[in-house]
Amino acid sequence: SIICNLMTRLPWWKRINRNDVVKNQLLSAACAVGVVLAFGAPIGGVFFSVDVTTSFYLVDNLWRAFFSSVITYTIVYSVGSSGLVELVYPPFLFVQYSNVQLILFAILGVVSGILSGAFVQMLLYVCKLSKSSPWLMTRKGAYFKALIISALISFTAFPSNFRIFRNDVKYTLEAVSYTHLR
């Protein structure tokens, strides 16, 4: 993207440099091509360019970024490399996965998708709830929402660290300090 931006300042590219829409289209495609050159991931390059340039991204740029990414990947792959990262970090040997591992990976993907969908639905519910309640729109309500959300995330992400239903605090502190010493 940096090279593309510098190239638009050359005298024979003045027409592109004057038109902001065309320049943004060119820069979003160049952003996708940069990811392809670095990592050898054409689809990831398109998603990255959409993510990075989302404030001015046009839907028409999607096929342009994808086409330029595929052409770049074809050229890079025909040279015999899968990206510039391969030059710095050589690829590992091809790993053979067993059928059980592949099934577990598929189950993990399905469970992650379901949990992600549930999280999005919960977030939509919280947004609707906060818009419907006038108290939650105040400053105290914002603090309350932040406190509840951080507590929920803490309890779900680190359930073993919160032993609030046990009376032996000394045992818990000794166990935590022992695990850090190991």
Image (cartoon, helix red, strand yellow):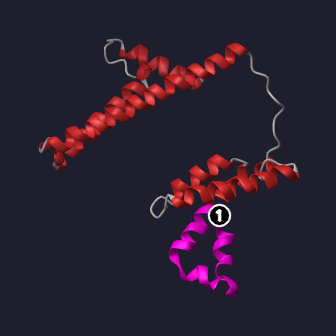
| Crowd class of label 1 (few under 14; some 14 to 19; many from 20; radius 10 Å) | many
Q: Left or right: 52 with respect to 149?
A: right
Marker count (numbered): 1
Residue drawn 18% across and 49% down?
Answer: 139
Give above or below for 65 relative to 9.
above
- SS at mark 1 in the image: helix
Q: Amino acid at mark 1?
A: Ala
Query: Picture coordinates of residue 163 (x, y %)?
Result: 37, 17
Magenta part of the chain: 1-29
Residue hosting label 1: 30
Residue drawn 39% across and 16% down?
Answer: 170
Give above or below for 48 relative to 136.
below
Q: Left or right: 146 with respect to 37?
A: left
Query: Picture coordinates of residue 98 (x, y %)?
Result: 74, 16
Closer to the camera in the image, 21 or 174: 21
Give above or below for 139 relative to 23.
above
Residue drawn 63% across and 52% down?
Answer: 45
Q: Is residue 57 highlighted in magenta? A: no
- Indicate the quadrant containing the C terminus: top left, top right, bottom left or bottom right: top right
- Indicate the quadrant containing the N terminus: top left, top right, bottom left or bottom right: bottom right
Residue drawn 51% across and 76% down?
Answer: 20
Query: Picture coordinates of residue 26 (x, y %)?
Result: 61, 68
